[in-house]
Image (cartoon, rainbow, N blue to C red):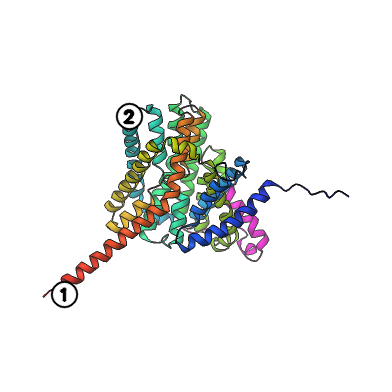
C-alpha cells in the first residue's frame, strides 16, 4: 500500500516558518528594546539565497509585501488629522524640496570622485532623499509619539515625500528618454486633482458619516469585507490614474478618520496589516546580495555615511527652524535618516528603462536595505545622545541654582 501525501503549497510552508521565526526573533528583539522590523529583514536574509535558500518564489512574497504597504498607509491615514497636517505645510514642502536637492548634489559630488555616470548619481540622489514611512511610523506607534508635536512634524514630511514620488518617477522616465504618453499625463493630472478635491472636502467638511454604518457595527463578518473595500478601493482608484496604490489607500484612511468607523475598522484589519507588513520586510531581506556588498564595500560605506549625515542634518535643521527644540529636531532627523521603501520604485523604474545598469540597481538595493536595518540602531543611538544631553543640562542647571 502506497501512502500518497499531497504536496504542500510553498506559501503555506513560508507562513509557518515566518510565524515560528518571528516569535523566536521577536522575543529576543523585545528584550533588547528593538523593533520587530529588524527581525523580519533578518528572517528574509536567513531564508534567502544568502542563508538556507528556502525561498525561491520571491515574486509572490514581494506582492504580499506590496499589500502590506497599502495596509500600512491606510492605517496611517486613519490616524492623521488633515487640519493639523495643513498647519505644518512649511515644514513638509520646504523640508522635502531641500532634501531632494541636497541629496542629489551630495551624491553627484561622490559620484564625480568615483567616476559614476551623472544619470546614476541623480537617480541615487532621488533614492536617498526619501525616508521610510513603514519604519518611522511603526517606531512612532511603538513609542507612542504619533500624536506628539514631533510625530506630527515627521508625518507631514513623510506624506510630502510619498506625494513627490510621482514627479520623481516622471523625471526618471524623461532621463531615460522615455516620453510619458499624453494620455498617461492627463490621467495622472486628473488623479491628482481628484485627490486634492477629496482632501479639500475632508478639510472643509471635518466629519462625514459612512453609509450602512449602524448595520455594520453589529456584524463582524460584514465589517471585514467593508474594511477591505474601503482600503483597497482607494488603492485601485489611484492605480487606474497611474498614481501610487499606497497613496490611494492613505487618502482612503484619511476619509475614514473623519467618519465614526475608525475604531472597528482598525480592529478588523490590524492582524492583516501585521502579517503583510512582515512580508514586505522579509522581501527586502531576500534581495540583499552580500557578495555584491563585500566587493563594493568601500563605495557603499561612503554613500551610506553620506545618506545618514545628509538626511539627519537636513531634517534636523528644518524641524529646528519650525519651532521644534534642538532635542526634538535631532531625534526627528534621526528618524528620517534612512532610505524609504518607495525608493525601490525609483530603482526599478530606472533599471527597467536602462538609466542604471545591474551595478547601479544592486548598489541602490543594497543601500536601501542596509539603511533599513541600521535605522533602529541609529535612532536608539540618537535617543541616547539626547537623553545624555538633557540629563547633563539638568545637572548643570541644578548646580548653578545651588550656588550662593
Would residue 234 be visible to someone looking at this image? Answer: no
Asked whether 186 or 10 is in front, the reply is 10
Residue located 55% across and 52% down the image: 278
Q: Is residue 13 left or right of residue 249?
A: right
The residue that mark 2 highlights is: 112
Residue 220 highlighted magenta (yes or no): yes
Q: For the residue carrying disc 2, how many other residues have a C-alpha within 10 Å: few (<14), some (14-19), or many (20+)? A: few
Percent x, y of residue 400: 16, 70
Would residue 68 be visible to someone looking at this image? Answer: yes
The residue that mark 1 highlights is: 402
Percent x, y of residue 219: 66, 64
Percent x, y of residue 316: 31, 51
Please name the predominant secondary structure of the magenta segment in the image. helix
Name which of mark 1 and mark 2 comes first in the sequence: 2
Quarter of image, res 274: bottom right
Labelled pair 1, 2 in contact (Cβ < 8 Å) = no
Q: Secondary structure at mark 2?
A: helix
Residues in magenta? 204-233
Q: Is residue 395 left or right of residue 115?
A: left
Q: Secondary structure at mark 1?
A: helix
Amino acid at each position: 500500500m502506497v501512502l500518497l501525501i499531497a504536496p504542500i503549497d510553498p506559501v503555506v510552508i513560508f507562513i509557518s516558518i515566518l510565524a515560528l521565526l518571528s516569535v523566536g526573533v521577536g522575543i529576543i528583539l523585545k528584550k533588547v528594546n528593538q523593533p520587530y522590523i529588524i527581525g523580519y529583514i533578518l528572517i528574509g536574509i536567513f531564508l534567502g539565497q544568502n542563508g538556507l535558500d528556502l525561498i525561491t518564489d520571491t515574486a509572490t512574497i514581494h506582492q504580499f509585501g506590496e499589500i502590506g504597504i497599502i495596509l500600512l498607509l491606510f492605517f496611517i491615514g486613519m490616524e492623521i488629522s488633515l487640519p493639523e497636517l495643513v498647519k505644518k505645510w512649511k515644514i513638509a514642502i520646504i523640508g522635502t524640496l531641500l532634501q531632494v536637492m541636497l541629496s542629489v548634489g551630495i551624491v553627484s559630488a561622490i559620484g564625480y570622485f568615483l567616476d559614476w555616470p551623472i544619470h546614476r548619481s541623480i537617480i541615487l540622489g532621488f533614492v536617498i532623499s526619501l525616508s521610510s514611512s513603514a519604519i518611522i511610523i511603526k517606531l512612532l506607534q511603538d513609542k507612542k509619539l504619533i500624536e506628539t508635536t514631533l510625530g506630527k512634524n515627521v508625518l507631514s514630511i513623510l506624506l510630502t515625500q510619498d506625494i513627490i514620488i510621482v514627479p520623481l518617477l516622471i523625471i526618471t522616465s524623461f532621463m531615460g528618454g522615455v516620453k510619458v504618453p499624453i494620455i498617461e499625463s492627463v490621467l495622472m493630472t486628473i488623479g491628482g486633482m481628484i485627490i486634492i478635491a477629496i482632501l479639500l472636502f475632508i478639510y472643509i467638511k471635518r466629519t462625514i458619516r459612512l453609509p450602512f454604518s449602524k448595520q455594520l457595527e453589529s456584524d463582524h463578518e460584514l465589517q471585514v469585507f467593508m474594511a477591505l473595500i474601503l482600503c483597497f478601493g482607494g488603492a485601485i482608484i489611484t492605480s487606474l490614474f497611474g498614481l501610487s496604490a499606497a497613496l490611494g489607500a492613505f487618502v482612503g484612511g484619511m476619509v475614514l478618520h473623519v467618519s465614526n468607523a475608525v475604531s472597528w475598522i482598525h480592529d478588523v484589519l490590524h492582524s492583516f496589516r501585521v502579517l503583510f507588513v512582515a512580508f514586505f520586510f522579509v522581501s527586502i531581506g531576500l534581495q540583499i546580495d552580500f557578495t555584491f556588498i563585500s566587493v563594493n564595500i568601500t563605495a557603499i560605506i561612503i554613500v551610506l555615511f553620506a545618506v545618514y549625515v545628509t538626511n539627519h542634518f537636513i531634517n534636523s535643521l528644518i524641524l529646528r527652524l519650525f519651532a521644534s527644540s534642538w532635542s526634538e529636531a535631532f531625534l526627528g532627523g534621526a528618524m528620517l535618516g534612512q532610505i524609504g521603501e518607495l525608493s525601490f520604485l525609483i530603482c526599478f523604474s530606472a533599471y527597467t528603462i536602462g538609466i542604471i545598469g545591474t551595478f547601479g540597481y544592486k548598489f541602490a538595493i543594497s543601500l536601501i536595505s542596509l539603511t533599513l536595518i541600521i535605522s533602529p540602531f541609529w535612532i536608539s543611538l540618537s535617543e541616547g545622545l539626547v537623553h545624555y544631553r538633557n540629563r547633563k543640562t539638568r545637572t548643570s542647571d541644578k548646580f548653578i541654582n545651588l550656588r550662593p
